[in-house]
Image (cartoon, rainbow, N blue to C red):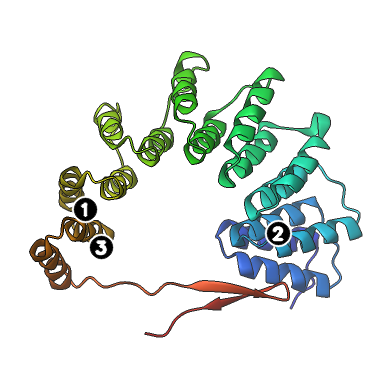
């Protein structure tokens, strides 16, 4: 193997991380250490990105200890990578501590990462408060932070606030909502049991709803007893994408909820004729800071 310098190692680790080959990226970092090549800020940002993708707080803590041991200077990008990792991997309080220690180094990415972490862990009220603090400090929000904010409102049942923030995007900040923002609103209304309102919202959207929005509506219809509406939406999804297995599964589940076993059976038969079958899932386990992939045998 040729002798690589830090730039080469960092480029390859970063490439693996961007391709979501995160376990391989972490292993490459271990190889880099074994070759006694000192990492820099760029290396650590890439490795932290891999840890975040793996959802491994333990690995992330280990990487942070490597940063301290190597006395690597924390620039804004490295701070943001650490905050994002802690926020998404479960230690939101540590993310907040790091965020508060940044002072003038904060960017909108810093604010967004903490808001996302708070939203993910059901701390919607705190996420909303942090957004208001961000705006009050003179940082202009962008479309990405609004996705995090609407998600926070969704997972904390803050429907009215969510509506107000969605309307403010265009009216106050001049941000045109994208499909992700509309998806957040549909999810918010569905989780609150406002299924018919969610359906009307979708019908009035100025852009074409994507299949994810349709499936969100169907699941809400099943959960809240709007079964005929769920049947109609499921049938439309199958018409638009006849080769996507999950669309048939959703319709089958609707018929099961209706106790219409004949229609449920006909959906299953249609799936079999198209040769549809479930793809085995994959999982990962972490042992001694190493990631091992597990594929079940059928």
Q: Earlier in the sequence, mark 2 or mark 3?
A: 2
Identify the residue under disc 1: 241
Point out which mark residue 180 bears. Answer: none
SS at circle 1 = loop
Q: Secondary structure at mark 3?
A: helix
Q: Nearer the viewer, mark 2 or mark 3?
A: 3
Position of residue 7 in the picture relative to residue 277 (left or right): right
Residue at which label 3 appears: 245
Q: Residue tagged by mark 2? A: 47
- As drawn, 70 above or below 112: below
Residue 35 placement: quadrant: bottom right
Q: Position of residue 67 (x, y in %)?
A: 84, 56
The residue lying toward the viewer, choosing from 40 and 292, is 292
Q: Is residue 271 left or right of residue 277?
A: left
Q: Pick the residue in front: 194 or 105.
A: 194
Q: Nearer the viewer, mark 3 or mark 1?
A: 3
Residue drawn 22% across and 70% down? 276
């Amino acid at each position: 193997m040729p002798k690589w310098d830090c730039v080469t190692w960092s480029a390859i680790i970063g490439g693996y991380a961007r391709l979501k080959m995160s376990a391989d990226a972490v292993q490459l970092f271990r190889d880099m250490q074994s070759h006694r090549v000192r990492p820099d800020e760029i290396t650590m940002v890439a490795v932290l990105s891999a840890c975040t993708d793996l959802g491994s707080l333990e690995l992330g803590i280990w990487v942070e200890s490597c940063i301290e041991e190597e006395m690597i200077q924390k620039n804004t990008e490295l701070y943001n990578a650490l905050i994002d990792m802690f926020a998404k991997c479960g230690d939101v309080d540590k993310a907040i501590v790091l965020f508060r220690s940044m002072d003038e180094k904060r960017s909108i990415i810093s604010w967004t990462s903490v808001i996302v972490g708070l939203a993910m862990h059901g701390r919607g009220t705190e996420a909303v408060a942090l957004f208001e603090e961000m705006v009050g400090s003179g940082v202009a929000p962008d479309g990405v932070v609004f996705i995090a904010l609407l998600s926070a409102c969704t997972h904390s049942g803050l429907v009215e606030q969510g509506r107000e923030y969605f309307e403010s995007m265009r009216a106050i900040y001049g941000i045109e909502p994208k499909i992700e923002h509309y998806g957040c609103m549909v999810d918010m209304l569905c989780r609150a049991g406002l299924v018919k309102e969610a359906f009307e919202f979708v019908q009035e959207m100025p852009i074409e709803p994507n299949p994810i929005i349709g499936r969100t509506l169907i699941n809400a219809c099943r959960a809240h007893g709007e079964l005929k509406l769920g049947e109609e939406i499921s049938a439309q999804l199958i018409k638009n994408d006849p080769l996507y297995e999950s669309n048939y599964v959703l319709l089958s589940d609707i018929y099961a909820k209706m106790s219409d076993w004949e229609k449920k059976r006909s959906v299953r038969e249609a799936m079999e004729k198209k040769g549809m079958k479930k793809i085995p899932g994959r999982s990962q386990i972490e042992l001694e800071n190493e990631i091992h992939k597990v594929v079940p045998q059928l």
